[in-house]
Amino acid sequence: MADDIKQTSGNGGETHQQAGSDTAVLTTNHGVPVSDNQNSLKSGVRGPTLLEDFVLREKIFHFDHERIPERIVHARGSGAHGVFEATDDISDLSKAAVFAKGEKTEVFARFSTVAGGAGSVDTPRDVRGFAVKFYTREGNWDLVGNNIPVFFIQDAIKFPDLIHSVKMEANSGYPQAGSAHDTFWDFVSLTPESTHMLMWAMSDRTLPRSLRMMEGFGVHTFRLVNAAGRSNFVKFHWRPKLGIQSTIWDEALKLQAADNDYHRRDLYEAIDTGAFPQWELAIQVFDQKFADSQPYDVLDATKLIPEEDLPLRVIGTMTLNRNVDNFFAETEQAAFLPTNIPPGIDFSNDPLLQGRLFSYLDTQKSRLGTTNFHQIPINAPRCPFGNFQRDGMMQTMVPTGRANYEPNSLADHGEAGGPRETVTGFATTKETTGPDETGDKLRIRPESFADHYSQARLFYRSQTESEQAHIASSFVFELSKVGLLDQVPPRMLGNLRNVDEDLAKRVADGLGLPLPKKNKAAKEPVDMPPSNALSIHKKMKATLEGRVVGILIADGTEAGALKSVVDAVIKAKGKAVIVAPKVGGAKLSDGKLQKADGQLAGMPSQLFDAVAIILSEAGCKGLLNEGAAVQFAMDAFGHLKAIGASAAAKPLLEKAGVIPDESVTALDDKFIKAAGKRYYEREPSLRMLA
Ligand code: HDE
């Protein structure tokens, strides 16, 4: 902060002056001590309340205005603080201080769904936002990305249409937080450029197991600029240290019922217990020559650069190590702006990115109500900042002196003249992005953006059989929810025929519709070599680290068996959660009472990555007629999880239709090994897949 500017409310990171936090005395917002917080001031014992009661009026006035407009997109989100450490020297590529090897930078990350409102559930089929604010020594850098590397549209002018179509329908106000409805599919079926993104959206990428197990992407092509002013193009990637993992559709649906806050709770609890989630930040760097030699345009946000063509280089690690103290003050008031960019990073001409550069600043005024939103502690830079912008609603700074304009010569008279140094400031890179930049003003989509299907095909063909089945089934499910617009599913199928004939056939079959004519492609797609990096299954880690094992017990459960499973799970860096018919606990074989972490009826197995069912003969008998117990085993099996069970628990497994396979084990080491994986090969025997 410039010397001549003082902030009255501190500046991020520290404890702020708050009602209730710095005084034992209950006061009004203006510091007047309150004598009674239980009863309003009345005229007589049973008479009407008096207008004079300023304590009541202030309290209710403030309450009436507690809510602010939610984000138009990404309204539902969860955030945490952390640190980014640069681990590689890329000074030849970028002069940004945040990338100087060894530099540690405070960060705030917010993960979000896109379509639902702030109070919607955590696990709908939806893209996830992955926004990180780096409080660098050269100002804030906001990398506002998603968990999918491409986007639905190529030009920002289509964004309001896209979002209107996916949000709840304008007349009825439903569905909430989901794309399975008429207007979304109407829009995307008329917008072939969205096809690649639809492949990702219909895959398990949109059903993350945990925010801690998501990849993140900057999506657009950006630039890195070095000290000599030379620039290269760059794509940013976040890679979770726990490995990427998703749930399956039936599991995600049931999670919505079991725990609306599944992802928020998971992130909060992990950080709270010291299991800090980490991501590597990696880059794909390339020059104009590389860009010109690709069969797609690197300025087109519906395209990715396959990792096989341009490997990722890891340049740092982000660790989220501190939960927010106050959800509203921090997570809700966090304002991310793609225009927050320090010297050493720059934009490209991607027409989607260009539109975002306007939108995010604009929306904060509507959401946070003031142009001074940058003074809210979560948004304020941690480095000194100062300029001649003044006043405005909710101004909390108290600039001193007369210097509110520039140039000035106030210093000649011994007055503070304010900041003026600009030598090290952000300078837009001069380099152009290609030969066809004529400078003419055109409302036009470049010819190089015309191939809408090759990368959609690349994505589909890079998936495992099981992943392909999930994609086909999701298309069937979503299109089956198109109610009134009969023309939409055939139109979508006509687009899918350009991606892959087999996919189109499977979706048509699943819908019970004839295969329509192929839609005319703006540019005929080409085959690209499959990319393993696009598949979740091909790169999932077999590990219990960061995962949760649910252990079902009842009266009579063998104490030794329970202890050894709990110990083994913890040793494998997993979390053990004990579930019993009564939360008060169960009496174990040694006569001791074991308290449960949750009651069976409220802790179904979708909340866990694997389950252990440790029952005595009597305990099992008692649970055979308990629907929740049967469902516990049935869903664990149906959701492709490992099941470890005591011999006496067999009747329960049989009743639940559990068919023994390599992942249904005794309670020994085999179970711990099996528990770190999902068993996708089991699925075709369990449900109809398209
Ligand atoms: Fe956003 N987007 N967006 N978006 N976006 C917002 O900004 C917008 C796009 C993304 O946790 C809004 O502060 C336009 C792509 C995330 O607070 C708004 C366009 C990507 C978040 C906005 C896009 C994103 C937002 C709503 C098309 C991935 C949540 C509230 C040109 C690279 C950030 C707000 C948080 C939020 C506009 C497209 C990611 C309205 C106009 C592409 C993660 O400004």
Image (spheres, rainbow, N blue to C red):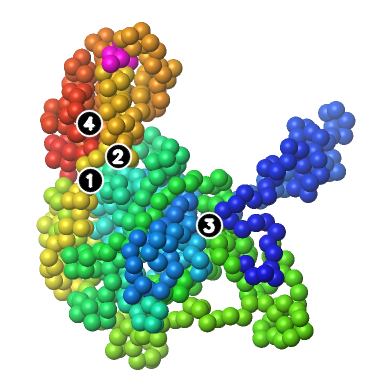
Q: Which residue is mark 2?
A: 545
Q: Secondary structure at mark 4?
A: helix
Q: Quadrant of residue 121?
A: top left
Whether the residue under disc 3 has CB within 8 Å of ligand 1: yes
* Residue type marked 1: Lys
Lower sequence index among marks 2 and 4: 2
**Chief SS of the magenta region:** loop
Q: Which residue is mark 1?
A: 541
* Closer-to-camera residue (130/200): 130
Mark 3 to mark 1 CA distance (whole Å): 33 Å
What stretch of residues is rendered in magenta?
554-560
* Closer-to-camera residue (114/229): 229
Looking at the figure, which quarter contains the N terminus? bottom right
Q: Which residue is mark 3?
A: 334
Lower sequence index among marks 1 and 4: 1
Q: Which residue is mark 4?
A: 672
Q: Quadrant of residue 648?
A: top left
Where 17 sits versus 409, above or below?
above
Residue 491: within the magenta? no
Q: Which mark is residue 608?
A: none
Q: Residues within 10 Å of mark 2 (few under 14, many from 20)?
A: some
* Label 2 close to label 1 by CB (< 8 Å): yes
Lower sequence index among marks 3 and 4: 3
Lower sequence index among marks 3 and 1: 3
